[in-house]
Amino acid sequence: MKFAFLDYFVFISYAIVIVGVGLWVSRKKKGEERSTEDYFLAGKSLPWWAIGASLIAANISAEQFIGMSGSGFAIGLAIASYEWMAAITLLIVGKYFLPIFIKKGLYTIPEFIEKRFSTELKTILAIFWIALFIFVNLTSVLYLGAKALDTILGTGDGSLLIISIICLAVFAAGYSLWGGLSAVAWTDVVQVVLLIAGGLVTTFIALDAVAPDGGIINGLKHIYAVVPEKFSMILSKGEIIKPDGGDAWFDLPGLSVVIGGLWVANLYYWGFNQYIIQRTLAAKSLAESQKGIAFAAFLKLIIPFIVVVPGIVAYVLNAPGGDLEIGNMAPGFIAEDGSIANDNAAPWLINTMVPAGLKGLVVAALAAAIVSSLASMLNSTSTIFTMDIFKPYIKPDASQKQMVTTGRVTGVIALIIALIIAPQLGNLSQAFQFIQEYTGVVSPGILAVFLAGLFWKKATNKGAIIGVLLSIPIAMYFKIGPNGWSDAAIFVSLPFMNQMMITCILTFIVIVLVSQIQSNGKADDKAIELTPGLFNTPKAFNISAFVIMIICSFLYAFFW
């Protein structure tokens, strides 16, 4: 079932509304000059509901809509740990990280490193993040998003890939580069409503279709009865095998998901990722920012039901009785090499089940997820380059206008580079997976540096630099082992998440040892003062946090 006229009308209307809202909220009065605070931090005027919506819109992209549906097809609800654990992580960030960040008046995360450690370490990390945003984040979102649109709107043979990449890039740039964070955040409010509505439409239609007697509740009961193994949150080694033959436990290693390396990935992403944390720094106040964090945590609890459950439904429809065989698969699931293409779960459902009109809404939701993430990454790349590279090193006396212009130019250049690289990812899939995985090699060390800087007064600049540098060979030790390049007995085989946790702990130990030797046990001159009342949170945040933790506890207990 392809796009009908009504679908095109809905989709085009969405695009016009988003660009219109973005340009309208970022308009300026005649003769008014936009400041860096206006452009990069939305004038520090965002209310809690805009912050929460923008956090989710920046986070959810094709990776969730397509990738997590594919994981739901392959291993089931266990992949939802990335979402439900993130809800708890957001509460930690809101209570213990944000008070320090906002008190310091930060524009960027690297700026914290400068205030706590040194300009040299800040610059190193700023360059790393700019490269990461351009060469990994922007390119992957463009490619995966365009691939999804090619599958849904075209034939999936790549004929629409290039035009989809260009259209997504132009769409995101159309309002974000001109309006800055104001345009990004306020359009995100619209985008997240559309994103959740479109996702729920797909889920409801899929559940109604899979139930023998119809009905959403009946659909849930049916898939739970047919494939109960898909509703296990904690996987044991060898318990579930992916359709492509890989061990599911290696990605989600049992209880380590709850008490291990997933915390490293989540704390790094939600606490120290510029394009995520930037909208919390743009709040009217700390209390408003914390309420926004809590709102985002509530929204996180919903995400698995709109991205993972459809994947499980697709599995049930193609595997009667729970037995998946190539011969039973719909044609859309067969890859060129004859294997099962898990990531086609969401596109297959949209193409085969969603009726005209609603299909335009669902694809608009997918586009909203892609475009909002692109816009956020562009804005954050511009912010880091302008505030951490351009102003201190290139033009220290730059005016507000010059810095805003630099931010826009930086965004354009970053987008052009991503446009050039993105189409090549299909030909370099293994190399790209290599880049994605090895990004995780540096994140444990960076997390250890931030945690030491925030909460340990004796951490020194030398300790932080040596720690983050040694974290690379520590992480690489695990890569060389039986799952990597060598079978030598001195190397060990561990799931990637466990590798991250061990690397983070060992890096922290290095920071402690070096700092103790250097400072002789004295507090560092740039240590953060953890004053009484610093971590006090408003009543609304406390109530929300309690409810969210109860819900998460129930979910893990029920789907154990």
Image: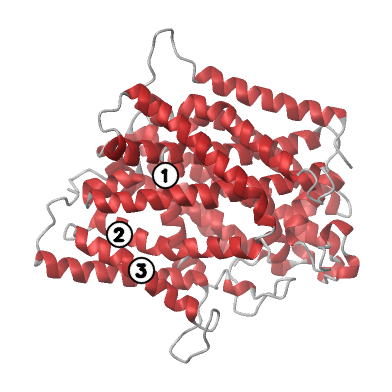
Nearer to us in this view, 253 or 420: 420
Q: Quadrant of residue 475?
A: bottom left
Q: Which residue, given by chain and number where applicable, does mark 3 sit on?
A: 471
Q: Do the residues labelled 2 and 3 touch (CB within 8 Å)?
A: no
Secondary structure category for the residue under label 3:
helix
* Place of residue 503 in the rendered image (x, y in percent of width and height, measured from the top left): 38, 71
Q: Residue shown at 17%/57% (left/top)?
A: 457
Residue bearing mark 1 = 274
Where's the N terminus, which quadrant?
Answer: top right
Residue 41 left/right relative to 62: left
Residue 102: x percent and y percent?
30, 38
Determine the residue positioned at 39% across, 19% down: 34
**Mark 2 residue type:** Val
Quadrant that contains the C terminus = bottom right
Q: Nearer the viewer, residue 461 or 215?
A: 461
Is residue 255 rendered to the left or right of residue 471?
right
Mark pair 1, 2: CA separation: 16 Å
Spatial CA span between label 2 and label 3: 10 Å
Q: Is 431 left, or right, of 502 in this rendering?
A: right
Q: Is residue 134 visible?
A: yes
Identify the residue at horizontal 63%, vertical 32% (top origin): 170
Q: In the rendered image of this protein, does residue 385 appear above or below residue 510? A: above
Q: Earlier in the sequence, mark 1 or mark 2?
A: 1
* Residue denoted by label 2: 449
Q: How is the image coloured?
A: secondary structure
User: What is the secondary structure assignment of the residue under circle 1?
Assistant: helix
Residue 133 pos. (x, y %): 49, 48
Give the amino acid type for the residue marked by disc 1 in the picture: Gln
Disc with the residue nearer the chain's start (2 vs 3) = 2
Question: Is the residue marked by circle 3 packed among few (<14), some (14-19), or many (20+) residues within 10 Å?
Answer: many
Residue displayed at 34% across by 37% down: 390
